[in-house]
Image: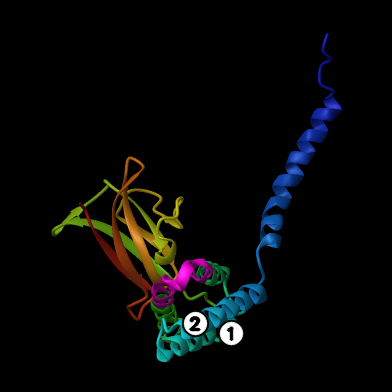
Amino acid sequence: MAKSPNRFTGLRNSLTALLIALWAPWLAQAKAPTEDEVVFELNQILFDAAGAARKAGLLGEAEIVSLQRNVDELQQRLRELKGGIPRPYLDSFAFDTQALRRALAKPEGNDLPAVWRAIGEDIDLKLAFVRSSAGITGNVSPVVTVSISTYKGEEEIRGAYFVQCNPRLVADEDPAFYNSPRPAPVDQLRFLPGQYVCFLVSKRVRVSSQPVSVGLSEGREEQIRLPVP
C-alpha cells in the first residue's frame, strides 16, 4: 500500500514554492542584459551594417551618418537620467539590434535599407521627444501617456474592440507589447515615443491594423483615433 505523504515533505515543498516566488523577479532582472551590453551591441551592429551598406552601395552616406549620430545623441541624453537609460528604451535598442542582425543575415542585404530607414524614423521620434520640453524633465522617464478611441467615420464606437500595439519593426509579435485592459476607449497607456502598428481585436482575432506615430506632439499626452473596419 502506498505511503501517505509526509507532512514535513509537504512543508518543504511549500517553502520551496515560496522561495521561488520571492526570488523569481530578482532572477528575471538578473538575466536582463545591462545598459552597457545593450548599447555596445547596438553600436556594434550599426557599425557592421553601415560597413555592409557602404560596400554594397545600399544607402547614401548622409542616411548612414544621420542614424549613427542620432542614436549616439539619444543614448547620451538618456544616460543623464538617474539610474541611466530606462529599461523600456534598452528593450527598444535590443529590437533594433535584432532587426539589423536579421537584415544582415539575408542574402545580398536586400532588407537592410528598409530596416535602416525604419529604425531611423523611430529614433528620430524618440530623439525629438527627448529634446523637447516634454522629454527629460528631472528624472522622469520620457514616455507618452496615450488615449485610444475607435471611430467609424465621425461616430465613436465604444466597447467593441480591444487594442493591441507593437513597435513597427516587430509588428506581428503576439502577445503584443501594449494591450488595452478593456475595449476602447482606453486611456493612461504609457508608450515610448516611436513608430507602432496598432490592431483592433474582436473575439481574440486581429481584424484590422493601423500604423501609428507616438511623440509627434510637444506634450506628454496624446490621443489616437483608430478607424473601425
Left/right of residue 109 with respect to residue 4 in the rendered view: left
Q: Is residue 84 visible?
A: no
Residue 84 quadrant: bottom right
- Indicate left or right for 173 with 39 as reference: left
Location of residue 219 with respect to 88 vertically, above or below: below
Magenta: main secondary structure equals helix
Q: Residue at x 56, y 82 (%)?
A: 47
Callout 1: SS: loop
**Within the magenta stretch, is there residue 102?**
yes
Residue at which label 1 appears: 80
Q: Amino acid at mark 2?
A: Ile
Assign a secondary structure to mark 2: loop
From the viewer's perspective, tell me whether residue 211 is left or right of residue 80. Answer: left
Left or right of 28? Residue 123 is: left
Q: Residue at x 70, y 46 (%)?
A: 21
Label 1: how many Cα within 10 Å (few below 14, some 14–19, many 20+): few
Q: Are marks 2 and 1 in contact (CB under 8 Å)?
A: yes
Q: Quadrant of residue 204?
A: top left
Decide: few, some or many residues near mark 2? Use Cα within 10 Å; few <14, some 14-19, many ≥20: some
Q: Earlier in the sequence, mark 2 or mark 1?
A: 1
**In the image, residue 67 lies at what x, y percent?**
46, 84
Is residue 213 inside the magenta stretch?
Answer: no
Residue at image point 20% right, 56% down? 151
The residue under label 1 is which amino acid type? Glu
What colour scheme governs how the chains and residues are painted in the rendered image of this protein? rainbow
| Residue 188 x, y percent position in the rendering | 40, 62
In the image, residue 176 lies at what x, y percent? 44, 54
Magenta span: 99-118
How many discs mark residues in the rendered view?
Answer: 2
Rendered-image quadrant of the N terminus: top right
- Please give the residue where the numbered disc 2 appears in the rendered image: 136
Vertical order, 175 against 196 (above or below) = above
